Image (tube, rainbow, N blue to C red):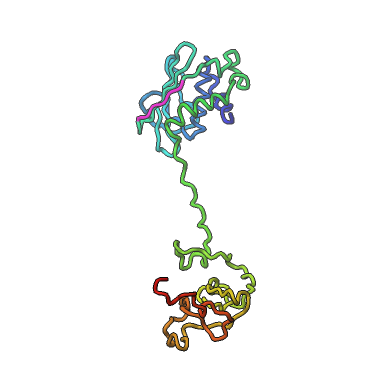
Amino acid sequence: MAGLEPLYAWALAAISRPQDALICGVHWELVRHGYRCLGAGDQPGPDERKSELLPAGWEANKEVYTLRYKSTDDARELLLKAIMVEDSMILNVMDRSSQKVADVTLAVADYINPEHLDDFHKVYKNTEELRTRIASGIITPLGPPAEKAKKEPEAEKKDPDLHRDYDPLRVPPRQPAGTRAPSWPSPLSPFAVGGEDLDPLGGRSGGMIVDPLRSGFPQPGTDPSSGIPGRLPPGAVPPGARFDPFGPLGAGRSRPDPDHLPPPGYDDMFM
């Protein structure tokens, strides 16, 4: 408990009972958590100032210890009353601004060796448990003092290219910025993926129309937007539009053609 040793040495002349030593430990824990002592008693005295030391007369009342504390940021003021009940000390602390109250009961023998009041290195025991009890029973319920304003963190460096024309609804590109685009096997632009769907006749190495008689063989491309002689005038199909031909194209179709073989009895009215 760094800092408690010089405090105990300073107050040693006034320490005559085990509870006096315990109050020193409680006082220092409040100091560690950002509070300073203003004085003893319920009411403020003249020329009070915040101090890490215990005030004069802090041990004068043998029944009740009454100390007032204020946070280093002046946001909170606490009134501490420590009452001895047999071998235990009841700590009652009130935040005067919010009227919140917290209390904790400590068995003096659990933390003080009464036979070593004159030796700081032997007088305290279970110091970590004492810290935990005070922190959980007093500091946490009342809320620690607000920390002093910290320096504002440096503004994060912003990439001007990243924030220019930023649109939160835009889907980011898969290609990371600053990297080289991979080579594409197709001579067409990589952004023309799916372009074969615009050419059902397979002029771009694929198509939606499958001819079982010519499957797997290259075919000359046909642009429906330029018109089909005897079938469609030029401009009848918008450029790039999906187009399913409504009849066989070209004169070089292989034989036999199923469309040229009418079914038997096709002219039978009862068929």
Q: Is residue 33 visible?
A: yes
Q: Is residue 82 above or below residue 260?
A: above
Q: Nearer the viewer, residue 252 or 234?
A: 252
What residue range appears in magenta? Answer: 99-104
Task: Please name the residue shown 47% across and 17% down the image.
Answer: 89
Count of numbered circles in the view: 0
Q: Is residue 224 above or below residue 206?
A: below
Task: Please name the residue shown 52% across and 14% down the image.
Answer: 17
Q: Is residue 116 above or below residue 170?
A: above
Q: Which SS does the magenta portion mostly show?
A: strand
Where residue 244 appears, x then y in whole percent?
47, 76
Where residue 115 appears, x then y in whole percent?
59, 13
Task: Please name the residue shown 53% across and 60% down the image.
Answer: 157
Q: Nearer the viewer, residue 200 or 215?
A: 215
Q: Nearer the viewer, residue 227 or 65?
A: 227
Q: Is residue 7 above or below residue 160?
A: above
Where residue 45 appears, x then y in whole percent?
37, 28
Query: Quadrant where the C terminus lies?
Result: bottom left
